[in-house]
């Protein structure tokens, strides 16, 4: 239950294209040749879902997929457990090609290797919280005591102890999604697929859910694919972020890379609205030389806002950035911080 074994389920998406329509295979060469989504629709009556996607999602990390509505996010995540069949390309999960699985293998794979958390929670209304949470293990045919033991453990971890006998309609949206998360974790699968799982929640509740997920992830180390159209959420959760537009990846990298160097105007439109002081970290902007005799130091990972406050409070002109072994790796001053808080700086 409290699994500590190493997660080996990285996900490799290779040259993945998806066209919706009856003659998809015939048209795939056009898509690979660069026909636009509009042209494909106007000239051939087919819908471009995804074009030549390559993403390497690390085992035990959080991969965020971001993009506006209709950009292909759901289509992409649904390929991972093959709710959608690709027109071309490969989806390797833990080294195994999902497309080559037989119906039986696929059923086992979905049941044991993946768990999903849905935007609309997807709880069964006539089942209470506990019965919703054990659902996956019930399907797996585990003994009842094991189902209940696992479910109670995860319900407590998501803060729902004491709510076991409530029904979904007695719970707020945030509480219902905690059940959704507990149910997914109770499945004990290495891969967690979360399609806009927090998008329906009120902003404060949403941030709470992000905190719960991040806290749990330190221990559970699932391979999480998390879809959102919210950049703040993406930056907070994502070890890596891939941004889609019209079925294509327009930029991928860490949140820091994307905020510091947005690839085009589409991405700039997302990035423009973030509070840079609360997103950019000291190591991203530091000068990579170390000076002697600097009194003040901050660890890597410190946000600019916190670093600035410490500098101002201390009356010092600069500070050293140290790594996890307390070794100096660079330095920053207020001017550098201020410059990078101005977009494009
Ligand atoms: N089953 C389907 N049949 C036809 N077109 C589809 C189907 N599913 C998705 N699409 C189209 O594929 C594109 C991407 O959709 P989707 O993956 O749902 O986007 P997102 O999740 O980013 O909002 C859209 O143009 C959508 O209309
Ligand atoms: Mg979607």
Image (spheres, grey):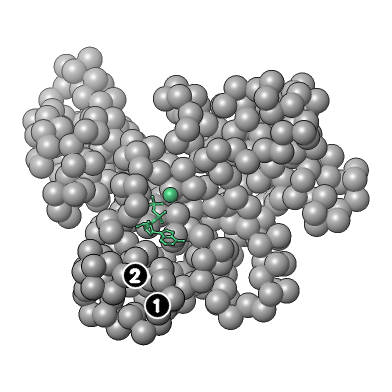
Residue drawn at x 46%, y 69% as measured from the top left: 12
Q: Is residue 86 above or below residue 72?
A: below
User: What percent of the width, then of the height, locates residue 220?
Assistant: 61, 47
Q: Is residue 207 left or right of residue 273?
A: right
Q: Can residue 292 be seen in this view?
A: no
Residue count near mark 1 (Cα–Cα under 10 Å), binned few <14, some 14–19, many ≥20: many
Give whichever of discs 2 and 1 has the lower sequence position: 1
Q: In which quarter of the image is residue 249?
A: bottom left
Mark 2 to mark 1 CA distance (whole Å): 7 Å
Residue count near mark 2 (Cα–Cα under 10 Å), binned few <14, some 14–19, many ≥20: some
Q: Nearer the viewer, residue 318 or 172?
A: 172
Q: Is residue 4 left or right of residue 330?
A: right
Mark 2: is the Cβ under 8 angstroms from ligand 1?
Answer: no
The quadrant of the picture showing ligand 1 is: bottom left
Residue drawn at x 80%, y 25% as measured from the top left: 165
Q: Is mark 2 on a helix, strand or loop?
A: loop
User: What percent of the width, then of the height, locates residue 158?
Assistant: 64, 31
Q: Is residue 321 above or below residue 19?
A: above
Q: Nearer the viewer, residue 267 or 306?
A: 267
Q: In this view, does 324 lie to the left or right of 108?
A: left
List the residue tagged with mark 1: 24
Q: Which mark is residue 93?
A: none
Q: In which quarter of the image is the C terminus?
A: top left
User: What percent of the width, then of the height, locates residue 129?
Assistant: 75, 31
Q: Do the residues labelled 2 and 1 touch (CB within 8 Å)?
A: yes
User: What percent of the width, then of the height, locates residue 116?
Assistant: 60, 50
List the residue tagged with mark 2: 46
């Amino acid at each position: 239950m409290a699994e500590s074994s190493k997660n080996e389920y990285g996900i490799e998406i290779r040259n993945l294209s998806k066209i919706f329509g009856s003659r998809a295979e015939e048209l795939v060469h056009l898509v690979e040749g660069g026909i636009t989504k509009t042209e494909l629709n106007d000239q051939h009556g087919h819908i471009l879902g995804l074009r030549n996607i390559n993403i390497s999602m690390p085992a035990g990390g959080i991969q965020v997929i971001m993009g506006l509505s209709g950009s292909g996010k759901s289509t992409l995540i649904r390929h991972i457990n093959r709710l959608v069949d690709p027109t071309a390309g490969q989806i390797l999960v833990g080294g195994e090609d999902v497309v080559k699985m037989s119906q039986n293998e696929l059923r086992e794979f979905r049941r044991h290797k993946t768990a999903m958390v849905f935007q609309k929670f997807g709880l069964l209304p006539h089942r209470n919280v506990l019965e919703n949470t054990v659902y996956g293990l019930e399907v797996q045919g585990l003994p009842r005591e094991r189902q209940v033991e696992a479910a109670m453990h995860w319900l407590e971890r998501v803060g729902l102890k004491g709510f076991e006998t409530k029904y979904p309609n007695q719970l707020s949206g945030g509480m219902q999604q905690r059940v959704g998360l507990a149910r997914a974790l109770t499945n004990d699968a290495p891969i967690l697929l979360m399609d806009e799982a927090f998008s329906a929640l009120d902003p404060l509740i949403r941030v709470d859910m992000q905190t719960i997920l991040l806290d749990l992830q330190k221990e559970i180390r699932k391979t999480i694919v998390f879809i959102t159209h919210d950049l703040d959420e993406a930056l907070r959760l994502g070890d890596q972020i891939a941004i889609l537009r019209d079925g294509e990846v327009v930029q991928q990298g860490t949140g820091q890379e994307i905020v510091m160097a947005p690839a085009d105007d589409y991405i700039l439109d997302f990035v423009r609205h973030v509070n840079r002081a609360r997103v950019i970290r000291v190591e991203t902007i530091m000068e990579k030389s170390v000076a002697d005799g600097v009194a003040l130091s901050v660890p890597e990972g410190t946000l600019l806002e916190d670093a600035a406050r410490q500098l101002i409070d201390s009356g010092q002109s600069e500070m050293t950035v140290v790594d996890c072994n307390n070794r100096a790796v660079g330095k920053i001053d207020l001017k550098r911080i201020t410059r990078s808080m101005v977009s494009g700086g």
